[in-house]
């Protein structure tokens, strides 16, 4: 998946030098301000252009 295909709000990239990878985290909610909280996903890359994922990173419990 290319960077341009990922739809995120408030993205954060965590570099992992030991693994030689980058981890992209962000809000996956369709409407982050008033919608139902859906959680966060993660994508993993070695070059910041091609990404594997989405990988669920956090899913809120009911009533979150």
Image (cartoon, rainbow, N blue to C red):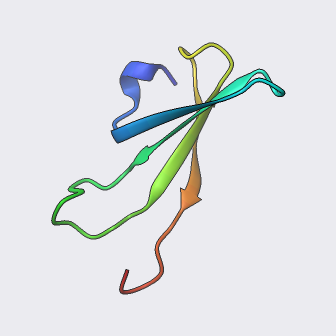
Q: Is residue 28 left or right of residue 14?
A: left
| Image point (43%, 44%), residue name | 26
Q: Residue furthest left?
A: 34
Residue 46's x, y, as percent?
Answer: 68, 18
Number of marks present in the image shown:
0
Q: Is residue 11 above or below residue 28?
A: above
| Image point (38%, 64%), residue name | 38
Residue 2's x, y, as percent?
Answer: 48, 19
Q: Is residue 15 left or right of residue 13?
A: right
Q: Is residue 47 left or right of residue 25?
A: right
| Image point (34%, 41%), residue name | 10
Q: Is residue 9 above or below residue 31?
A: above
Q: Is residue 45 above or below residue 8?
A: above
Q: Is residue 60 above or below residue 13?
A: below
Q: Residue furthest bottom?
A: 63
Nearer the observer, 14 or 61: 14
Q: Is residue 14 left or right of residue 17?
A: left
Q: Quadrant of residue 35?
A: bottom left
Nearer the observer, 40 or 12: 12
Q: Residue furthest right?
A: 18
Residue 27's x, y, as percent?
Answer: 38, 50
| Image point (15%, 66%), residue name | 34
- Quarter of the picture containing the C terminus is bottom left
């Amino acid at each position: 998946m290319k960077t341009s295909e990922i739809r995120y709000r408030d993205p954060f990239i965590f570099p992992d030098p030991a693994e030689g990878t980058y981890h992209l985290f962000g809000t996956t909610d369709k409407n982050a301000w008033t919608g139902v909280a859906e959680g966060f996903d993660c994508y993993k890359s070695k070059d910041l252009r091609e990404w594997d994922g989405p990988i669920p990173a956090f899913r809120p419990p009911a009533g979150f």
